[in-house]
Amino acid sequence: MQPRRKKAYLGFAVIAVFAAVTIAAIPSAQQGVPGYAYVSSEMILRQTPGFAAAESTWNAEVASMRADIEEMSRQLDSAVRAFDQQSIVLSPTARQEKQDELRNLNEQLQSRGNDAQMRADQRQRELMAPLEERIQAVIDGLRAERGLGVVFDVSAPGNNIVSADPVLDLTSTVVRRLTGGSE
């Protein structure tokens, strides 16, 4: 090879290697195939078939629990008012007995309130679990179908995503698949 051709060939080879390394280093998102996407699980859940019925059931059950707690709270308030009016004429022993009785009623009210909250939380999990499982299955399917490594939830507490390309948003696709719509 002539020295000029050799230099041109080496220059071309260096450029070709540099181009190959550069193209390989370009993130897949720039090549049109991102390794990640995101959804708003809150928005998806609200649009999932069956959500309105589950939410309505839960609200009715919680309303019943609240009514029970509110009635018990009214009874305690009434007992406290009666005690306040009578405390002056009560003997120290009778006053102490009434105060102990009111303290017990208050503890019962707090205990029943805590129990009701735990039951409400448990019932909400029971009602939402089948919906969340269906949603998760669709998201997992989309992730695998599109070759994604990660799908973020932008509605999750503590989410640190402050800006994202709307093209990567799978929320509407998940909703369409859950509701039987076409893409």
Image (tube, rainbow, N blue to C red):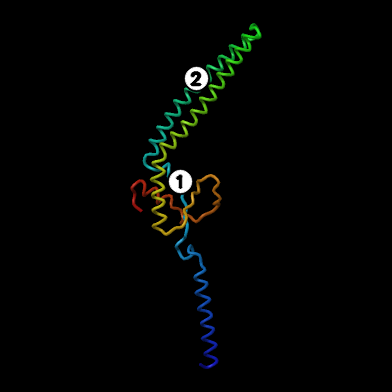
Contact, CB < 8 Å: mark 1 with mark 2?
Answer: no
Q: Secondary structure at mark 2?
A: helix
Q: Quadrant of residue 77?
A: top right
Q: Dot 1: within a 10 Å radius of its alpha carbon, few (fewer than 14), some, or many (20 or more) residues?
A: many
Note whether 179 is above or below 114 in the view shown.
Answer: below
Closer to us: 8 or 144: 144
Q: Residue at x 35, y 46 (%)?
A: 179
The residue type indicated by label 2 comes to Glu
Residue 27 location (% of width, % of height): 50, 65
Is residue 181 rendered to the left or right of residue 41? left
**Which residue lies under the disc numbered 2?**
71
Nearer-N-terminus badge (1/2): 1
Picture coordinates of residue 73 (x, y %)?
53, 20
- Which x, y percent locates residue 132? 41, 43
The residue sitting at 39% across, 50% down in the picture is 138
Q: Residue at x 44, y 58 (%)?
A: 148
The residues tagged by marks 1 and 2 sit, at their Cα atoms, a distance apart of 37 Å
Task: Name the amino acid, label 1.
Answer: Ser
Q: Position of residue 15 (x, y in %)?
A: 53, 79
Residue hosting label 1: 41
Q: Residue at x 52, y 72 (%)?
A: 22
Label number found at residue 21: none
